Image (cartoon, rainbow, N blue to C red):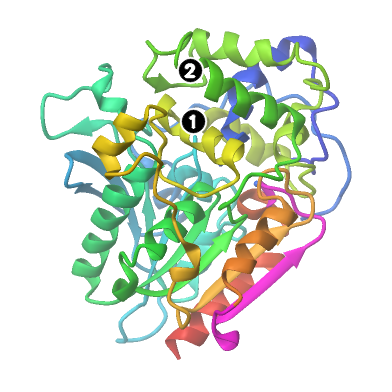
């Protein structure tokens, strides 16, 4: 994408389309020359999303080996998983390659890691540096919409989950599978929601023994300081309205008319600027280019559940990291044995687990003050096990689509993992 600082060149017609797409960025849940130029409207030559799978569409075509795999969760969801076992030039000789698992953000899927060229996307950079790369896709995304029972994605019951279930079922299933296949502990990379579910899981002592190290890009744990007016209005609307107007739509699909109408209605709120919508949601991304953004528009947004969106909105409203609030005390008692949802206590994360956090000064979703709250929970972490990177000019999408992310972030991620494996 020609480098982005907003959607200032968008026409009114494009704006309606973007209302559907950019909610990808509400809650998560992102260098070339020409820094500072505004993004123009997407190309009229539509880039079609893959139908054969992520490997065929975005990995094998670049000369890498890639496997399409399925993993089944304990509650029956069948998740798509891709494996890039080595780089185009094989390294490490006969040594075992260390596994790295990448987990995408909300309303995205594994394709979001592969939108830039092989020289500029994290999975292929890791593979070329001798790692065994695995890409996870959460339930509800296009290649993870099957269930072992008769539960179909067109039914309400299929969508009865929030990120609590990603913590309890999706992450354990994927990590158990990767550990079983490789016989090794995992190096983990999460972006946005992918950081949230890792932090929540680790705080409960889950998967700790299977994690070698953890990288968190645009870390999301708290949303109380989210500085996007559009995001705040959307979060408040989800808490207040999903229970009434949108109760019948268990799937939150940004491409559907009902969701589009809801999103467009947010533009009527005072203080909300829907003209520069990308910046309004994510902050001013400094370093995106137009070709990658065309792929982004073609492949994202992915579906999630309305319940998941409500859960994120509760996190913003309450300023805490807690399990889903069923509102009625009796319902919470039924699910948790107490009238209020249990808190995820991040100070319980093992102090000797190697962590690398990278966050941006322009990120409206992973706000600087919220990241500082997260770091406050990690203040007793072993000093030599916690690495923190702050990139003043980065916003939410720069971490996965920025053309200078290799130099700014990914080289540091590779070095961090190699230190743990030395």
Q: 208 or 144, which lies in front?
A: 208
Q: Position of residue 270 (x, y in %)?
A: 81, 17
Determine which residue is flagged by label 2: 242
In magenta stretch: residue 393: yes
Secondary element under disc 1, as helix, strand or loop, is helix
- Report whether 14 appears left or right of 199: right
Residue for point 65% across, 19% down: 19
Secondary element under disc 2, as helix, strand or loop, is loop
Q: Position of residue 318 (x, y in %)?
A: 57, 40
Residue for point 29% across, 38% down: 333
Quadrant including the C terminus: bottom left
In magenta stretch: residue 30: no
The image quarter in which residue 386 lies: bottom right
Q: 327 or 119, which lies in front?
A: 327
Residue for point 35% across, 62% down: 204
Would you place residue 296 above or below residue 338 in this image? above
Confirm whether residue 20 shows in the render.
Answer: yes
Q: Position of residue 216 (x, y in %)?
A: 55, 62
Would you place residue 405 above or below residue 186 in this image? above
Q: Where are the magenta residues, as a range? A: 380-398
The image quarter in which residue 264 lies: top right
Would you place residue 362 above or below residue 252 in this image? below
Q: 63 or 411, which lies in front?
A: 411
């Amino acid at each position: 994408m020609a480098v982005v600082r907003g959607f200032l060149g968008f026409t009114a017609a494009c704006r309606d389309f973007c209302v559907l797409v950019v909610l990808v960025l509400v809650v998560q849940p992102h260098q070339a020359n020409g820094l500072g130029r505004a993004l123009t409207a997407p190309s009229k030559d539509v880039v079609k999303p893959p139908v054969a799978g992520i490997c065929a569409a975005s990995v094998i075509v670049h000369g890498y080996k890639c496997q399409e795999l399925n993993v089944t969760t304990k509650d029956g969801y069948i998740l798509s998983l891709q494996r890039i076992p080595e780089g185009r030039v094989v390294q490490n000789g006969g040594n075992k390659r260390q596994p790295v698992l990448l987990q995408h953000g909300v309303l995205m899927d594994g394709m979001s890691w592969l939108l830039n060229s092989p020289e500029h996307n994290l999975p292929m950079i890791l593979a070329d540096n001798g790692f065994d790369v695995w890409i996870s896709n959460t339930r509800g995304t296009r290649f993870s919409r099957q269930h072992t029972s008769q539960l179909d994605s067109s039914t309400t019951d299929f969508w009865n989950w929030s990120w609590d279930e990603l913590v309890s079922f999706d992450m354990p299933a994927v990590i158990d599978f990767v550990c079983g296949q490789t016989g090794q502990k995992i190096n983990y990379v999460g972006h946005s929601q992918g950081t949230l579910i890792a932090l929540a899981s680790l705080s409960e002592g889950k998967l700790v023994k299977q994690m070698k190290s953890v990288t968190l890009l645009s870390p999301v744990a708290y949303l109380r300081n989210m500085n996007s007016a559009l995001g705040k209005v959307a979060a408040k609307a989800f808490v207040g309205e999903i229970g009434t107007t949108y109760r019948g739509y268990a799937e939150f699909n940004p491409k559907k008319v009902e969701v589009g109408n809801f999103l467009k209605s947010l533009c009527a709120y005072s203080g909300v600027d829907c003209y520069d919508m990308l910046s309004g949601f994510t902050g001013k991304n400094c370093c995106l280019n137009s070709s990658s953004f065309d792929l982004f528009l073609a492949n994202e947004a992915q579906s999630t559940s309305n319940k998941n969106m409500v859960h994120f909105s509760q996190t913003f409203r309450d300023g805490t990291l807690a399990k889903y609030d069923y509102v009625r005390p009796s319902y919470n008692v039924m699910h948790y044995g107490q009238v209020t949802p249990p808190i995820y206590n991040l100070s319980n994360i093992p102090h000797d687990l190697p962590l690398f956090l990278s966050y941006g000064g322009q990120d409206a979703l992973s706000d600087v003050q919220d990241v500082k709250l997260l770091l406050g929970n990690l203040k007793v972490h072993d000093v030599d096990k916690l690495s923190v990177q702050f990139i003043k000019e980065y916003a939410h999408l720069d971490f996965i689509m920025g053309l200078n992310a290799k130099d700014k972030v990914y080289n540091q991620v590779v070095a961090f993992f190699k230190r743990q494996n030395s």
